[in-house]
């Protein structure tokens, strides 16, 4: 899996706890097969998350942005990290696996908007996030 793309604190080295696994399972249930299937999600795994409150990480197939600021034509593997924060909000971070560069980051999501935020990542327009699903 693509754990090396995300940084963790020293205490997270030993892997997810039962609480982290419970949080990851809740995220998986909320996203559901439709959203995960739409993203081409594979390799779902429970992780401590960016804030050590639990998270779900998976590989998705997403159209990348090119250096020229245009949308690529072929999907690339992206590592997606869905993390719970201490404020009970959710952060969603997407990084390109091959380059390790950040593709998108959405912070402060509530659980009822998690599916829309995840779908906004996979878009073929000029913006990184699909405005039909997510606006700042």
Image (tube, rainbow, N blue to C red):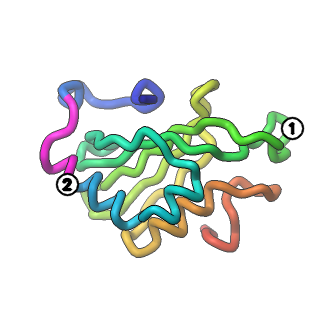
**In this view of the protein, which residue sits in the foreground, 62 or 103?**
62
Point out residue 80 in the picture as x, y percentages from the top left corner: 49, 44
Residue depicted at x 23% and y 25%: 13
- Percent of width and height locating residue 36: 50, 56
Location of the C terminus (image quadrant): bottom right
Drawn side of residue 8 relative to residue 22, left or right: right
Where, quadrant-wise, is the N terminus in this rendering? top left
Does 18 appear in magenta? Answer: yes
Mark 1 = which residue? 68
Q: Is residue 20 left or right of residue 2?
A: left
Q: Give residue 15's quadrant in the image.
A: top left
The magenta segment is 15-22
Residue 109 at what x, y percent from top left?
A: 43, 65
Residue lying at 47% horizontally and 53% vertically, measured from the top left: 92
User: Mark 2 highlights which residue?
Assistant: 22
In the rendering, at what x and y percent does residue 120 appear? 62, 62
Task: Give SS at disc 2.
Answer: helix
Most common SS among magenta residues: helix
Q: How many marks?
A: 2
Asked if 113 appears above or below 117 in the picture, the reply is below
Residue at 43% x, 45% y is 81
Mark 1 vs mark 2, CA separation in Å: 41 Å
Is tag 1's residue or tag 2's residue first in the polypeptide sequence? 2
Front-most of 47 and 37? 37
Neighbour tally class for label 2: few under 14, some 14-19, many 20 plus, Cα within 10 Å: some
- 64 lies above or below 83: above
Compare residues 80 and 53 and report the one nearer the observer. Answer: 80
Residue 1 lies in the magenta-colored region? no
């Amino acid at each position: 899996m693509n754990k090396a793309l995300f940084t963790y604190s020293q205490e997270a080295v030993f892997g997810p706890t039962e609480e982290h696994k419970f949080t990851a399972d809740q995220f998986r249930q909320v996203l559901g097969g439709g959203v995960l299937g739409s993203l081409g999600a594979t390799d779902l795994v429970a992780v401590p998350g960016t804030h050590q409150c639990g998270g779900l990480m998976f590989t998705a197939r997403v159209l990348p942005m090119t250096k020229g600021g245009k949308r690529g034509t072929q999907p690339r593997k992206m590592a997606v990290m869905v993390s719970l924060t201490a404020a009970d909000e959710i952060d969603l971070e997407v990084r390109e696996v091959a380059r390790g560069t950040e593709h998108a980051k959405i912070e402060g999501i509530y659980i009822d908007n998690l599916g829309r935020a995840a779908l906004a990542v996979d878009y073929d327009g000029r913006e990184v996030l699909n405005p039909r699903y997510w606006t700042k």
